Amino acid sequence: MLIAISKPKTLHQPARMDYRGLALIAGGVALSVFGFQQSAIWGWSNPATGACIAVGAAILVVFARVEMRTASPLMQVSIFRIRPFLVENLVLAVSMLVFLPVFFFASEYAQIALGKTPSESGLYLLYFFLGFVVAAQIGGRMLDRIGAKRPVVLGCVLAAAGFELWAGKVTALDFGSQQIYIILAGAGMGMMLGQANTDAVNRASRLSYGEATGITQTVRNYAASLGFAILGTILVSQMRSRIVTSLIHMGVPSARAHAEASHLSQSQSGGASTASIPHFVRLDFAYATQTVLYVMAAIMAAAAVVALLGLRRGVQEDSPADGPEVEQATLA
């Protein structure tokens, strides 16, 4: 209904389907994500792990080069010549390594370490959205008034601080001491995420809005998939290592401790009551989650650096050199 009321001007550009590009990007994304995901099972010493990641990355490079020479490409990679669009997508890619995965890991922590039910773990995540929604409104007003740099940089810094402080409290197994830091992490993500996404699309040529949106969403989804794979590997590895240490300290033989730790790290799932999960397993899972949150804090700090160095102050406009160049490439 809103679209019908606004009556946006749409430029239709019929083109042939780029099946070659589709096959390349699908293969590159699938292989690279699969390699990171399987590293927890295969181990980094297994040549297959590195091979999947390397081949996937190589295919994506080939995809970019092929698209630059294709008359009707699946993705107009020349749009990345617009500097603000490129920088905002880098910020989005880095931050999306955290944004979607945090919901999964926080939910698992609430159920396994804190003994919450699935419904109660949803309330645990509600605190994150409380900060997110409020800060998103503030960030949006800042974007309209002074441009994207300040809300994006400030949001990344707040998120990094929130995850860092949150990580310091998870091993106490006390939800009350974590609430303010969960809100802070959510506020940081809310202040920067929507603003970075909106500014990225606005920086593209008007003739490329639809394509810019599609590219931005592809970058976000790919980064989120990598985040799940990489952070999941860290969680499983850390939990397995800590359970082995705990079992050995309890007098369990090393071989049996490793076997039991491998089983527990792969099979623990939410929904069980606190009483049914040994306290040492709950605590070990909390320490593994702490490591993941510290990594998330470092990732958001890296996003802050990218935004600080890459974005310009003020409401950004397309430079004369950028607009026609991308419009010509799009119309071609």
Image (cartoon, grey):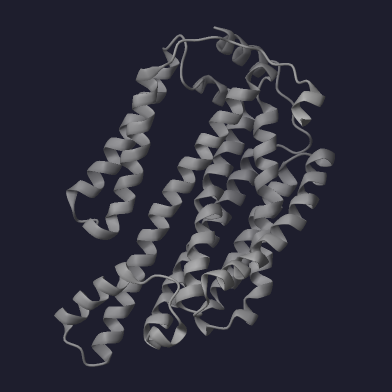
Residue 293 can be seen in this image? no
Query: Is 257 placed left or right of 208 in the picture?
Result: left
- Residue 266 in the image: x percent, y percent? 30, 67
Question: In the rendered view, would you say 280 is above or below 101?
Answer: below
**The furthest residue to the bottom:** 251
Give the position of the N terminus as an image quadrant: top right
Quarter that holds the C terminus: top right
Q: Position of residue 248 (x, y in %)?
A: 24, 87
Q: Residue at x 69, y 53 (%)?
A: 190
Label count reads 0
Residue situated in front as seen by the camera: 76 or 91? 76
Q: Is residue 308 left or right of residue 107?
A: right
Which residue sits at x=63%, y=20%? 208
The residue located at (57%, 55%) in the rendering is: 300
Q: Nearer the viewer, residue 266 or 117?
A: 117
Quarter assignment of residue 60? top left
Q: Residue at x 55, y 26 (%)?
A: 80
Residue 153: x and y in percent read 68, 50
Query: Looking at the picture, does residue 248 appear above or below residue 16?
Result: below
Tell me the quarter of the picture where residue 44 sits: bottom left
- Would residue 56 be seen by someone viewing this image from the given angle? yes
Residue 244 in percent (x, y) is at: 26, 79
